[in-house]
Every structure is written in C-alpha cells, then in structure tokens.
Image (spheres, grey):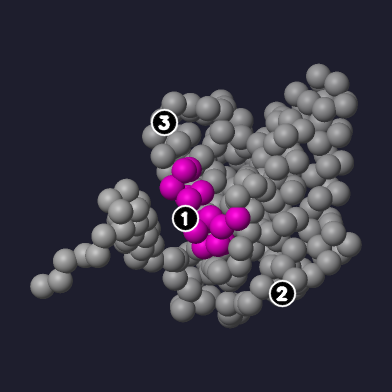
Amino acid sequence: MRYTQYSYRRSSLFGYFPPGIRWLLISNTLIFLVYFLGGGSVKLHLTTLFALWAAAAVRSLFVWQLFTYMFLHGGITHLLFNMLTLWMFGTMLERDWGTRRFLKYYFLCGVAAGVCVLVANIAVGDWQTPTIGASGAIFGVLVAFGVLYPNQTVLMGFLFPIKAKYMVMIYAAIELLLTFGPNTGVSTVAHLGGMAFGYLYLKRRMPSVALPDVRGAWRQWRLSRAKRKFQVYMRKHGNRDPWSN
C-alpha cells in the first residue's frame, strides 16, 4: 500500500462524517456514558477489565486491553478534545485513504502507543497504574495529517493558525519535554508512541515522506527575528542611510 501527499481540499466537514469517523465518535461517546452514568461498580468493572494495566495485560494476558483502553476516557474534557481532534484531522484522511485503511492506521497507532506504555511502566516497576484514552491513536492521526497536508493552515489548540507540519513538530517537542517533567497524570509516552509509530508506518509505505526541516525552520525563524530587530533599530535611529563600502 502506497500513500501520497495530498493537497488539502475544502469540504463540508460540518455536514459530513465518513463511516469510520462516525463509528468512532458514536462508540466512544456511548461507552463514555455507560462508564460515567453506570455508577461506581460499573466504572470499576470496566476499568479493571478494559483499561490498560501492565499487571493484567502482561501477567494475566488480558491482551485485549491494548485495544479496549482507547475507548475509555477520564472525563468530558478528555473525550471532547480527543473526538474533536479526530473529527477535524481524521475526516480528510479517511476520505482520501478509505475507511478500512484509515481505521487500520488509527488502531495500529493506538496499539503501538499502548505497547510503549506497557514497556515504560514495566521498566520503572509500575504494574498497577491504568491507562485510558484514545490520545495515542489521535496523535498518530495528527502526524499523518501533518505529513500528507504539510502546508495546510490549521488551528493549533483550536485557536492559533499554523501550518500543519509545524503543528506536529511543536506537539512532538511539547510531549518530549513533558516526558521529563513532573507527573501530570497524562501519558506522554502514549502520545509520543502513537506519533513515532505513525511516522514510521507512513515512512515505510511512502519513502518520500520526510518531516519538516527542523534546523531550516529554526534558521528561518532566527533570520526573520533578526530582520525585525534591524527594522526596529533603523526606525529608532531616524532611518539613516546605511554606510557603503
């Protein structure tokens, strides 16, 4: 299977949901309602069986947890952010790839993120902390969008316009920094795992894929910053003609 870079096409996102996206939105929402409205015993039961625990997934061979943990969310904000991001960036991918290929990619990113979480937890001796949420798969979707629509302007954090390729770079840098910071209760390992797997998966099937030139972007930013400083300096000094030599 080969992937190609696409030019972004505007579509009626507000009036159209591809089948895969629609199924993911409905299933995640329904499970969330059962999870939180079913009472403490239902929540405990679902968490024990379907959240991702190193003790259960590895020692008790509850391998299905690598798949089911993606359908559990810790709160309404967690669910809304993931589902809105999935809808915004996954719709074009599914329409260009087709439902089967898109869902395959989505779940492979989520499972790979879960494996990274298990490896990290076992490495530090943490067998009892559960992991829930579709963020690993969602970050894989973000990487695919940034790779296939690199120059499309998107709203980072739903607020700031930025090219998709730079958004992916910034998110990756933030997640990497958070990994070495204090524990916030958010699994940055899952996020980075989903992003890394997504990029490698696309790279294997699309050899021409390359992430944006980080050093080139940094040099361009520094040059632009120096230019602005020079313009400010010239305005402050009466805009005198420069010396010639």
In screen coordinates, is 237 left or right of 194?
Answer: left
Disc 3 crowd rating (10 Å Cα; few below 14, some 14-19, many 20+) is few
In the displayed image of the protein, which residue is found farthest to the left? 245
The residue that disc 3 covers is: 181
- In what element is the residue under mark 2? loop
Find the magenta span and give its range: 161-175
Q: CA distance from mark 1 to mark 2?
A: 22 Å
Task: Based on the picture, tell me whether residue 168 belongs to the magenta stretch.
Answer: yes
Left/right of residue 189 with respect to residue 144 in the rendered view: left
Q: Are marks 1 and 2 in contact (CB under 8 Å)?
A: no
Q: Residue at left 47%, top 55%?
A: 169
Q: Secondary structure at mark 1?
A: helix
Query: How would you rate the neighbour count of disc 2 (Cα within 10 Å): few for under 14, some for 14-19, many for 20 or more?
Result: few
Q: Read off the residue under disc 2.
A: 9
* Gap between marks 2 and 3 measured at Cα: 39 Å
Residue 74, by quadrant, is top right
User: Residue 21 — which label?
Assistant: none
Q: Amino acid at mark 1?
A: Met
Residue type at the position of mark 3: Gly
**Where residue 204 sits in the image (x, y, percent)?**
49, 73
Q: Write down the residue under mark 1.
A: 169
Q: Secondary structure at mark 3?
A: loop
